Structure formats: C-alpha cells, structure tokens
Image (cartoon, grey):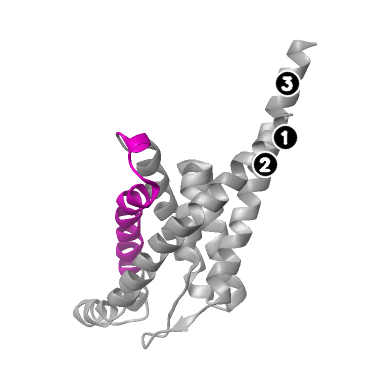
Amino acid sequence: KEKQRGCHNMKSKKTRTIILAALLAALTTVATMIIRIPTPTLGYIHLGDGLVLLCGILLGPGLGAVAAGIGSMLADLFGGYMAWVPGTFAIKALTALAGGWLYHHMAGRERMNMPVRVALCGIPAEIVMVAGYYVYEVGMELVAGSAAGAAVAAVLAGVPFNIVQGLAGVIVCAVLLPVLGHASAEMGERIRT
C-alpha cells in the first residue's frame, strides 16, 4: 500500500509540473501580447520576459526553457511575426535556461533576499536575450542581402530597446515570483494531501 501511495504521489507531482509548465507557457504568451509598446525598429517592448525568467526559476532550467520558448514563440506566431518564431523560441528558451540555472545554482541564495537573487540571475539571462536577438537580427539582414557592415549597424539600433525590455522583465519577475512561487508551492501541497 505504501508503494502504491508513493507511485500516486509521483504521478501527482508529474501532473502538477506539466500543468504548471502549460500555465506558465500560456501566461508568457499573454504577457508578451497584452501590452506592446512599439519601437522605432519595428519591434515592441513587452512584459513577457518577466514570465520567461519565472519559467526558468519555477520549473527549473530544462522544463522552464521549453515552456518559455513555446510561450514566447506562440506570441510571435499569433502576432504575425513569422520570421521571428524560430529565433524567439531558441532565444527565450536560452534566456530561461540561463536564468533558471543561475537561480538554482547561486551560492548562498537562501540568505539573499528574493529581488537580489532575481537581479543576479535575471540580468545575465537578459544579456543572453539581447545578444541572441542581435545575432539573429544580423543573420536575418544578411539573408535579406544586406552587407555585413550595414547589417551590424542597422541592428545596433534595436539593442537599447531590448535592454529596456530585459530590465523590465527582471522587475516583473521580482514582483511576481513571491506570488507565483507561493501559489505553485500551495498547489503542490494540495496535490500531496
């Protein structure tokens, strides 16, 4: 009977994790699409990066990367940014992977307050995002026939907007993590009992 209970608890935990991953992917899509601040570079600033970081932190780097990549990619797909879909999937997955890995492997994290931990893992993760989009956009310009120097110069104009988006994501994550982290833990407790 004890073995059966352990098996049931394991299935419940897996179910809970899958539900949380799907929910966070959906929330990432919504957060990316709901508030869009257009930029002169034909992109937009959004709050989805906060959810990307939350995916990595709450689900761990691996599953968090998948949820963040899918959620962000769906926002581009639904928004009509087809050329960005593969790049967004990879870049946001890497962002969540970096943020989640740093958060869970940070030495002394138990003694640090949560906003400091989020900043220490979120800023390097968002650097991954800014660099990823820079490389992807340069590649897109080159494929479109631009000269290398022109592509590099043209894409530089978007970097400050991606930096603002990344910093906004760190702030959103720091605000939402205590609430969603608590709700996630509560959901796990209900499933276990």
Closest to the observer, 150 or 45: 45
Separation of marks 2 and 1 at Cα, in angstroms: 6 Å
* 132 inside magenta stretch: yes
- Residue 90 - label: none
Residue in the image at 29% along x and 74% along y: 159
Q: Residues within 10 Å of mark 3 (few under 14, many from 20)?
A: few
Mark 3 touching mark 2, by CB under 8 A? no
Tell me the amino acid under the disc marked 1: Ile
In the picture, measured across the screen, residue 70 lies left or right of residue 104, that is right
Residue in the image at 26% along x and 79% along y: 151
Residue 88, above or below 161: above
Please give the range of residues in magenta: 108-135
Return the residue at label 3.
7
Return the residue at label 2.
187
Disc 2 secondary structure class: helix
Separation of marks 3 and 1 at Cα, in angstroms: 13 Å
Mark 2 touching mark 1, by CB under 8 A? yes
Disc 1 secondary structure class: helix
Residue in the image at 55% along x and 52% along y: 179
| Tag nearer the camera, 3 or 1 | 1
Return the residue at label 1.
191
Q: Where is residue 158 in the image (x, y as percent from the top left)?
A: 31, 78
